[in-house]
Amino acid sequence: MPVSTLNSALGNYFYDIPVSFQFDVTVLTLTGPGDCLFQEVSGLNVKLEVDTVQEGGNNIEAYKFPKKLSYDNLVLKRGLLKNSILVSTWVKPALESFKFSPKTIMVSLLDELNIPVVIWIFYNAYPVAMRTSEFKAMDSSLAIETLELAYSYFERVDL
């Protein structure tokens, strides 16, 4: 059932709250068939760090001043792909040869018609970790690779 229909069935809401399972990841200037089909995206977090300053002679009150923004790493998970252009031309050179090529990454949250409703744009992203899931003979799960990216900052664009 489309989100707008669901919202209408539940009552008149001012906002259409999108679902979180329909999204798209794009690494600008780097493409490959199926290379950016991820099953999970996390790390869309920003936090304002503050400095706490105690007033001299006053042990009760403290003042908090904005210091800087800190961003979590962007974490992308997908089934392990053989011959991935993303891995061979961007991740491996960074993690094996220390050759970094920062990229702009877009994560788009899509509506029921595959139209972006919110886009997060990550600037100067580069790989800082790559993990592969455990192999277990008694488990019938897929091999999952996790790519972790650091970046300078992100901006959220509501459409």
Image (cartoon, helix red, strand yellow):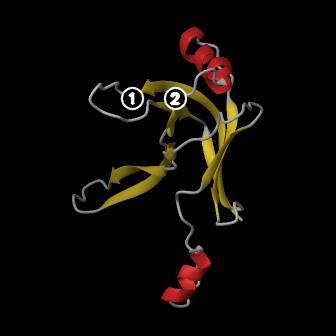
Q: Residue at x 29, y 25 (%)?
A: 137
Residue holding disc 1:
133
Give the answer, above or below, for where 96 lies relative to 5.
above
Residue type indicated by callout 1: Ser
Instruction: Tell me: 13 left or right of 53.
Output: right
Which label is found at residue 80?
2
Give the answer, above or below, for where 44 lies relative to 134.
below
Q: Quadrant of the N terminus?
A: bottom right
Marks 2 and 1 sit apart, C-alpha to C-alpha, by 9 Å
Q: Are marks 2 and 1 in contact (CB under 8 Å)?
A: yes
Residue 151 pos. (x, y %)? 59, 35
Residue 144 pos. (x, y %)? 45, 32
Looking at this view, name the residue that lies furthest to the left: 59
Q: Quadrant of the C terminus?
A: bottom right
**Quadrant in which residue 136 is drawn:** top left
The disc, 2 or 1, on the residue closer to the chain's N-terminal end is 2
Residue 93 pos. (x, y %)? 62, 14
Circle 2 Cα neighbour tier, 10 Å, few/some/many (<14 / 14–19 / ≥20): some
Residue type indicated by callout 2: Leu
Circle 1 Cα neighbour tier, 10 Å, few/some/many (<14 / 14–19 / ≥20): few
Instruction: Tell me: 105 left or right of 8.
Output: right
Residue 113 pos. (x, y %)? 70, 65
Q: Residue at x 59, y 12 (%)?
A: 98
Instruction: Tell me: 92 left or right of 71.
Output: right
Q: Residue at x 39, y 56 (%)?
A: 64
